[in-house]
């Protein structure tokens, strides 16, 4: 592969291109109208305009992207995350056109894109799963029977669902009929597929995912876990590696389970196997994400590997360069996602232009971004501005580095979630590792930030006043000096 096309935008497009360049591979960017001057377009060796701003007219148009690859002679397509990254039809189209898809085969994408199909695929591999059923259910009486057997609370999930969409917690049997009906009609409306199933509801879980790498020869390794329990409405806020709760024994067992999941769907490339960890540290397989994830940098830092480089090497048909026993965790990494959202106003998207944009720097600090000072933030895409990542010899050091890096990140023109990230990093529950997926709901209240801002304002006012008064004095001193000088001369 001498040239690849990156079917994405923003920080991830740029991040992929940087690795391609390092490997001596030419890059082709694709872009929409509003991204004409975006960093990923400027960085690429070539760029092809796809169409208008809405992704349905640009980053999601499969024919145009494949056309762009053919026109420029790109031999591979990297889909990044989001957009077409987990679209089996696109992966197939790419391959059918004689281009290498830098990712898994369509079969794996398809199976793992459907929760019931995923359960079916892994059922002979003795992977721990949440107690529940493996088939879609519509019959309310049958659902009642099953729910009684499992025990309340239960969770109704849409098989085609993702990111928490189409999930309903049911506390008691009286609520079941109504919640079932709602779940089914929601699933039909959102996914065009009304298949729902039932699981025991794990009330205080932690979200732990295992990174895997699989080559085309059937070798599979895991690159340990990332913990992503701090999230808000299924949007991850802070991620870290390793998790602060896993023992070496649980880590090994989860890693082995993740490898089995990858083998069950004949996986190729970089993938992530999601688990829930309950309060008693039992883990359960949830689903597999068949793409490079937003939070992959924390894994890169603790393993000293470049995951995009690994993806490209696997896509080129190379053998994995290491075995499981050659891999180990070194240090601790933390990622805070910086969204153009207002944490004081219910995380509403904050639109505007990046009038000031100054990144924190220093050893142990990494910023993955796709914007520059002076750029307007397009309203058409994900509001994530950047990822702030820190790396220390241990968790406490990574947290302190993060707090300092947040303070040194200067963004003006839009509100961002940086202060919210700082709130999390400074919170005792986070610092002690004593938290679950309910962290934000349990502890966050905009009042915390308002107080902090008020304090900052007060300090700023005091500093301003002091400077002003010092300045007055300063003005006086030379006057006196000058009069003294005159006096002395006379
Ligand atoms: C669960 C669960 C509790 N019990 N399944 C949310 C998204 C999807 N990946 C699965 N999710 C959950 N499944 C059972 N049986 C709780 C969640 C969940 C969650 C999981 C991971 C991270 C954040 C979450 C927030 C709310 C609910």
Image (tube, rainbow, N blue to C red):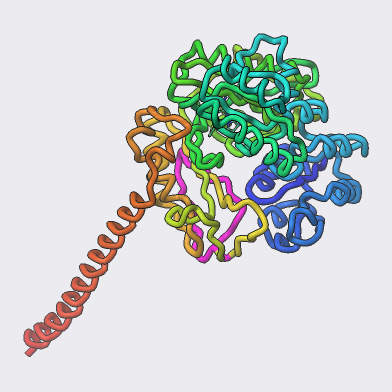
> For residue 98, which quarter of the picture?
top right
Depth check: 237 or 197 in front? 197
Quarter the C terminus occupies? bottom left
Q: How many marks?
A: 0
Mark yes or no: residue 389 visible. no
Which residue occupies the extreme bottom position in the image?
Answer: 490
Q: Where is residue 89 in the image (x, y as percent from the top left)?
A: 85, 37
Which residue is at 45% across, 53% downward?
343
* Magenta stretch holds residue 407: no
- Quick check: 84 above or below 49? above
- Quick check: 214 above or below 34? above
Depth check: 171 or 299 in front? 171
Mark yes or no: residue 170 visible. yes
Horizontal side, residue 302 vs residue 455: left or right? right
Query: Magenta residues, as a range?
Result: 354-374
> For residue 483, which quarter of the picture?
bottom left
Q: Position of residue 252 (x, y in %)?
A: 55, 13
Quarter the N terminus occupies? top right
Which residue occupies the extreme right position in the image?
Answer: 97
Which residue is at 75% across, 29% downward?
313
* Magenta stretch holds residue 357: yes
Depth check: 181 or 136 in front? 181
Which residue is at 74% across, 60% downward?
53
Which residue is at 43% across, 32% downward?
392
Q: Position of residue 137 (x, y in %)?
A: 71, 25
Quadrant holding ligand 1? top right
């Amino acid at each position: 592969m001498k040239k690849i096309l990156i079917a994405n935008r923003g920080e991830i497009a740029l991040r992929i291109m940087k690795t391609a360049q390092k490997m001596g591979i030419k890059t082709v960017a694709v872009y929409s109208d509003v991204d004409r001057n975006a960093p990923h377009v400027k960085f690429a060796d070539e760029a092809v305009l796809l169409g208008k701003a809405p992704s349905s007219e640009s980053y999601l148009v499969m024919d145009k992207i494949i056309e762009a690859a053919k026109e420029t002679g790109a031999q591979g397509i990297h889909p990044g995350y989001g957009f077409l990254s987990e679209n089996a039809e696109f992966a197939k189209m790419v391959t059918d056109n004689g281009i290498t898809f830098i990712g898994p085969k369509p079969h794996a994408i398809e199976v793992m894109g459907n929760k019931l199909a995923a359960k079916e695929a892994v059922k002979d591999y003795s992977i721990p799963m949440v107690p529940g059923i493996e088939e879609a259910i519509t019959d309310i009486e049958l659902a009642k029977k099953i729910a009684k057997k499992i025990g309340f609370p239960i969770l109704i999930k849409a098989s085609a669902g993702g990111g928490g969409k189409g999930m309903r917690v049911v506390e008691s049997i009286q609520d079941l009929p109504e919640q079932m009906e709602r779940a089914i009609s929601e699933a039909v409306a959102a996914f065009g597929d009304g298949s729902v199933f039932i699981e025991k509801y794990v009330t205080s879980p932690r979200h732990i995912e295992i990174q895997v790498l699989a080559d085309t020869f059937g070798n599979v390794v895991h690159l340990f876990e990332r913990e992503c329990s701090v999230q808000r409405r299924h949007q991850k806020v802070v991620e870290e590696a390793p998790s602060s709760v896993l023992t070496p024994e649980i880590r090994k067992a989860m890693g082995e389970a993740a490898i089995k999941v990858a083998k069950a769907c004949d996986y190729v490339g970089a993938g992530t196997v999601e688990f829930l960890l309950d309060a008693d540290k039992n883990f359960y397989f949830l689903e597999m994400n068949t793409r490079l994830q937003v939070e992959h940098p924390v894994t890169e830092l603790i393993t000293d590997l470049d995951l995009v480089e690994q993806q490209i090497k696997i896509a080129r048909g190379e053998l994995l360069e290491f075995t499981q026993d050659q891999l180990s965790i070194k240090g601790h990494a933390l990622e805070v996602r910086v969204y153009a959202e207002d944490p004081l106003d219910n995380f509403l998207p904050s639109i505007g232009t990046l009038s000031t944009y100054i990144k924190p720097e220093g050893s142990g600090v990494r910023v993955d971004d796709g914007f520059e000072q002076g750029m307007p933030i397009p309203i058409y895409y994900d509001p994530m501005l950047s990822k702030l990542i820190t790396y220390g010899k241990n968790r406490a050091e990574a947290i302190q580095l993060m707090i300092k890096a947040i303070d040194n990140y200067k963004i003006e023109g839009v509100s961002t979630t940086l202060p919210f990230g700082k709130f999390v990093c400074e919170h005792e529950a986070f610092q002690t590792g004593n938290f679950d997926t309910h962290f934000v709901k349990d502890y966050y209240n905009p009042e915390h930030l308002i107080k902090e801002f008020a304090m900052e304002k007060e300090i700023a006012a005091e500093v301003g006043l002091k400077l002003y008064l010092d300045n007055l004095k300063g003005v006086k001193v030379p006057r006196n000096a000058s009069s003294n000088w005159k006096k002395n001369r006379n």
